[in-house]
Image (cartoon, rainbow, N blue to C red):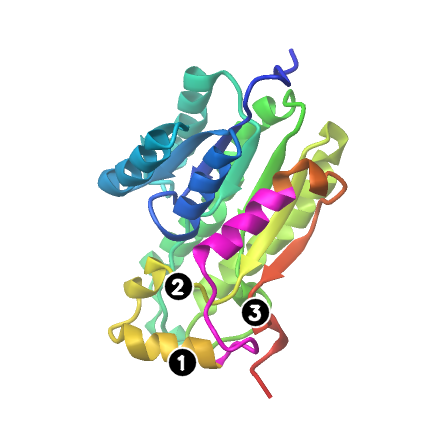
Amino acid sequence: MMANNQSPRVAVITGAGSGIGAATARLFAQKNHRVVLVGRREQKLAEVSDDIQSSGGVALNIVADLADPLACERVVATSIQSFGRLDVLVNNAAMIQTGSLEEMTTELIDDHFALNVRAPLLLAKASLPHLRISPDASIVNVGSSLGSILMPTTMLYGSTKAALDYMTKAWAHELATYSIRVNCVAPGVIDTPIHETYSDDLEATYRDLSSRVPLGRMGSSQEVAEWIWFVTSKEASWATGNVIHVDGGHSLGPPA
């Protein structure tokens, strides 16, 4: 049965407790979507959902570690149980830990690929039966400029984002028969809390990152959220299989 085109679309957004995910959840709620916020930190999710609901939106929080394969199925099942449909999946959750090849451990490798690659794949698979019956279905993978260019010590993160770029194109081709559009929004250096997970000197890190961007500054979560929204909108209904760099020119190389 086709989902009712008159009722609000439902968007599942991972990594929704802060940064790009939180900005995306707020924007989709403003656009009359029911939003499912997925993340590991209950308090952070609550802060975002409280903000959404105080503005008249509808939000559901699901605390989950998406590195656990069973969590992906639970997220989709809970979303359907709560709202009865699923129209948009935004795969935003990710981790980054810098280091040289010599410093890589089996655990670190497995952690990166479990969250950054396997989780989006399993979420898309679990969502597929519901996306097929949506009148306007989209998957948006949040990639990175580091999936296209080299930055020393980001081997693991960049490799997982390159994999996400490839999966975006593969899914777009396969799922076109169901009119499910799949695109990737690839941010550059964005002012988000993820940098705190690998840097001991955040101020120096921000200066260094900004110096690598031709437009001369870091981007904001809101700037990325606007693009995530756009590729799911009717205005982008002819677009699928794209990797869209929203990075101030970062993927073009450092400033002259």
Question: Would you place residue 122 above or below residue 211 in this image?
Answer: above
Q: Which residue is mark 2?
A: 191
Label 2 packing within 10 angstroms: few (<14), some (14-19), many (20+): some
Q: Are marks 1 and 2 in contact (CB under 8 Å)?
A: no
Q: Which mark is residue 248?
A: 3
Sequence-wise, the earlier of marks 3 and 1 is: 1
Q: What is the distance, in whole Å, between disc 2 and disc 3 at their CAs?
A: 13 Å
SS at circle 3: loop
Sequence-wise, the earlier of marks 2 and 3 is: 2
Question: Is residue 34 visible in the rendered structure shown here?
Answer: yes
Pair 1/2: label in front: 2
Question: Would you place residue 244 above or below residue 139 in this image?
Answer: below
Quarter of the image where one finds residue 79: top left
Question: Is residue 114 visible in the rendered structure shown here?
Answer: no
SS at circle 1: helix
Q: Are marks 3 and 1 in contact (CB under 8 Å)?
A: no
Q: Which residue is mark 1?
A: 208
Q: What is the distance, in whole Å, between disc 3 and disc 1 at their CAs?
A: 15 Å
| The N terminus sits in image quarter | top right
Look at label 1 and name its amino acid.
Answer: Asp
| The C terminus sits in image quarter | bottom right
Residue 70: x, y in percent? 38, 31
For residue 33, side relative to residue 198 (left or right): right
Give the camera-side residue of 225 and 109.
Answer: 225
Residues in magenta, as a range: 212-231
Pair 3/1: label in front: 3
Look at label 2 and name its amino acid.
Answer: Asp
